[in-house]
Structure formats: structure tokens, C-alpha cells
């Protein structure tokens, strides 16, 4: 006798957790993170509206894979270790000196050309002004934005960085 399995009333959405500064906790699916806002849907209503919250109202995000991003008023800091571009040392704190000594960098114009000619690599390293160093898969490049996903969490949200915030690209 064949067995028949079915799913009734269960959501197949992954669950992320938003912790707001007012201590409210929301179970959601995050879709996009840009310079100032986070876009998400409630997991209880995946076909419902997209919600938007200002980053300044977010204390932290815990993604489905247990990666945590802690937000301050000015930036997000991943809790995993990063490589200090200046010294090459691994540290839990990003390099905020703004000075880097990086070889094999490419220009924003080169990255834009690679995007337009569809010759992007699978992985780039972005060095941001806030000292963050992020391994990314580029989704889109415009004159003023780079849209990407974190290579450690490719099914996670898309990030939007203003090109003025990018110090170096490897």
C-alpha cells in the first residue's frame, strides 16, 4: 500500500527573527536590506503585503541559519569573524581605520562593465567605509548602488549598498 504524504496548514517559508528596539520580536521572512530599510513578509501570511521597517528601529536580525546581525544606529555588524584588510589578522571586530592595503582590486567601472557584459564572477569581496568586509555574490550594479547577497547566506535577503560606501572591491 503506497503511503501518501501531504502538508496541511504548514508554511514552507524559512523563518527569520527581527528584534526591534522597542523589544518587539517579529517572526518574518526578510527579502531585502538596503541602506536605511528592511523589507519583509510575515511568515503567517506569506502571500500578504510586504512590510518595511527602518533600520534605526531594528536591534538585531537572526536568520534561519542562526547567523545574527546586530544593528546600531549607523551600521550592522555581523557576529562572525572578519579579516582585517590592513593586517590580515582575523578579528571579531571590523577594521574601522578606513585605510586598506589591498592588492587585486577592481574599479567600480570595471564591476559595472562585468555586470553589463554578464561576466561577473561568483564571488567578490566588498570593503565598506564602516570597516565591514563582506564576501558577496553581485546581483546588479548601477551608477549609485550595488545589489548583492552575502555568500554565506545566498538564500537570505538582498543587500543594497550605495557605491559611495564601497572602499574597495576584490
Image (cartoon, rainbow, N blue to C red):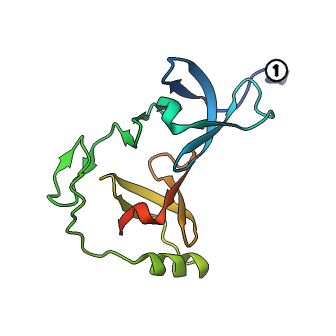
Query: Please, is residue 119 above or below residue 15 in the view?
Result: below
Residue 123 is situated, as x and y percent measured from the top left of the image, at: 44, 63
The residue under label 1 is 8
Q: Position of residue 93 (x, y in %)?
A: 24, 42
Foreground residue, 97 or 170? Answer: 97
Residue positioned 53% across, 77% down in the render: 112
- Estimate the x, y position of residue 26 in percent, counting from the top left: 60, 22
Rendered image quadrant of residue 92 = top left
Crowd tier of the residue under label 1, counting other residues whose Cα lies within 10 Å: few below 14, some 14–19, many 20 or above: few
Above or below for 10 versus 75: above
Residue 148 versus residue 115 in the image, above or below = above
Q: Can you say which quadrant of the picture contains the C terminus?
A: bottom left
Residue 156 appears in the figure:
no
At horizontal 51% and vertical 24% (from top left) the residue drawn is 19
Q: Is residue 59 left or right of residue 25?
A: left
| Residue 153 visible in the picture | yes
Image coords of residue 48 (percent x, y): 80, 33
Q: Is residue 43 left or right of residue 135?
A: right
Q: Residue at x 81, y 22 (%)?
A: 3
Location of residue 43 (image quadrant): top right
Residue under the image location 57 percent in, 45 percent down: 157
Amino acid at each position: 500500500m503506497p503511503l501518501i504524504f501531504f502538508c496541511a496548514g504548514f508554511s514552507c517559508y524559512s523563518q527569520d527573527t527581527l528584534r526591534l528596539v522597542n523589544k518587539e520580536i517579529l517572526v518574518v521572512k526578510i527579502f531585502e536590506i538596503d541602506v536605511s530599510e528592511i523589507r519583509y513578509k510575515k511568515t503567517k501570511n506569506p502571500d500578504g503585503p510586504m512590510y518595511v521597517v527602518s533600520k534605526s528601529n531594528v536591534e538585531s536580525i537572526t536568520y534561519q541559519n542562526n547567523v545574527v546581525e546586530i544593528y546600531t544606529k549607523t551600521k550592522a555588524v555581523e557576529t562572525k569573524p572578519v579579516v582585517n584588510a590592513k593586517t590580515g589578522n582575523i578579528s571579531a571586530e571590523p577594521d574601522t581605520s578606513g585605510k586598506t592595503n589591498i592588492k587585486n582590486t577592481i574599479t567600480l567601472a570595471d564591476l559595472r562593465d562585468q555586470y553589463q557584459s554578464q561576466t561577473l564572477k561568483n564571488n567578490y569581496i566588498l570593503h565598506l567605509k564602516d570597516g565591514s568586509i563582506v564576501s558577496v555574490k553581485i546581483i546588479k550594479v548601477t551608477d549609485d548602488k550595488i545589489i548583492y547577497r552575502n555568500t554565506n547566506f545566498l538564500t537570505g535577503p538582498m543587500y543594497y549598498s550605495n557605491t559611495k560606501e564601497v572602499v574597495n572591491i576584490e
